[in-house]
Image (spheres, rainbow, N blue to C red):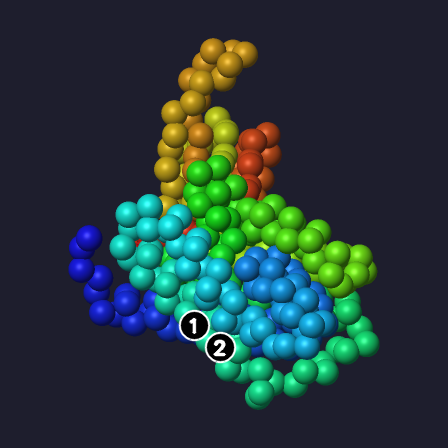
Amino acid sequence: MSRVPWRVALRDAALIITGSFVFAVGVDIFEIPHGLAAGGVTGLATVFSAIADSFGFYLPVGLQTIVMNALLMTLVVRSGDKGYIVRTVAGIIACGVLTDALVPFLPASVGESDLLLCALWGGVITGAGLGLVFRSGGNTGGTDIVSQILARKTGMPMGTAVIIVDGVIIAFSATVFSVEQALYAAVAMFICGKVIDAVVDGPRSARAAYIISTEHAEIANEILYTLNRGCTELQARGVWSGNSRPVLLCVLGRSESMRLKQIVAEIDPEAIVIISEVHEVFGEGFKRIEG
């Protein structure tokens, strides 16, 4: 494994600690006190904690997650990625410790009579926290490990994988709490997954435009010198006609897409223009790619 630059290591550590803190705040205020077991090892630990409480003894949720993750770490060790293992262990410990350590300092009655409010804010805050940890290249352990491996193998979005894996835990929670709480936990889980995708993939702030036109040379010139954007000419062939025709590819900012359509409309109103959203763009004219 190559040596990780100290700036990258410091950035990853900051993401893990900050994300774990945000996640712990979300579960301690909005989920655990209201019986919302929104999936994951934390959700499973919430169920076990409620069962223990019914028998009169306290079973810390954070401590449970650390113990459970010790069993699941075999999946991470098999990956052979030492950097990933280190980040995951750090996320597991940070989340587990902070989940228990922050309880005495956080209010426990926010949204007490409104489960929907708790589900909404619980999903947003925990999703933001998990997303920050995932951006470091690690995770918070538990079913997040399973979800991340599933996402890698299938190519599905990370948030979608989390939703699939955690659905089973939510169904189990209905047997301990109530069906109503399980349904609200599902809302929290869904929102959490969507927020994870937004944090990990970034906002859809860029557009990729494909332009097919007989006036491709003039359009490309306007893109280069009016929009000051790069333009790539792709070689394509019409299936019906069999004729070769160039396709222009241009990546531009959200605010520039309207100007591009105006340029194309002025030069060739019959041109075919396809504009799609992209999550992230790296390189000249956009943000620098980071390791």
Q: Where is residue 153 drawn, in percent x and y?
A: 44, 38
Q: Residues within 10 Å of mark 1 (few under 14, many from 20)?
A: many
Q: Residue at x 61, y 77 (%)?
A: 58
- Are dots 2 and 1 in contact, CB under 8 Å? yes
Q: Residue at x 61, y 57 (%)?
A: 39
Label of residue 98 in the image: 2
Label of residue 279 in the image: none
Residue 127 vertical position relative to residue 190 in the rendered view, above or below: below
Determine the image quadrant of residue 248.
top left
- 59 or 156, which is in the foreground? 59
Q: Residues within 10 Å of mark 2 (few under 14, many from 20)?
A: many
Image-based side of 97 in relation to 82, left or right: right
Residue 140 vertical position relative to residue 279 in the rendered view, above or below: below
Label of residue 94 in the image: 1
Looking at the rendering, in which quadrant would you find the C terminus? bottom left
Q: Residue at x 77, y 69 (%)?
A: 115
Q: Secondary structure at mark 1?
A: helix
Image-based side of 132 in relation to 57, left or right: left
Instruction: Answer yes or no: is residue 268 visible.
Output: yes
- 72 or 282, which is in the foreground? 72
Determine the image quadrant of residue 134.
bottom left
Q: Where is residue 123 drawn, in percent x and y?
A: 64, 64
Q: For the image shown, how many numbered marks are present on the structure?
A: 2
- 206 or 28, which is in the foreground? 28
Image-based side of 8 in relation to 40, left or right: left
Amino acid of disc 1? Ala
Q: Where is residue 44 drawn, in percent x and y?
A: 60, 60
Q: Where is residue 99 drawn, in percent x and y?
A: 53, 75
Instruction: Answer yes or no: is residue 206 visible.
Output: no
Amino acid of disc 2? Leu
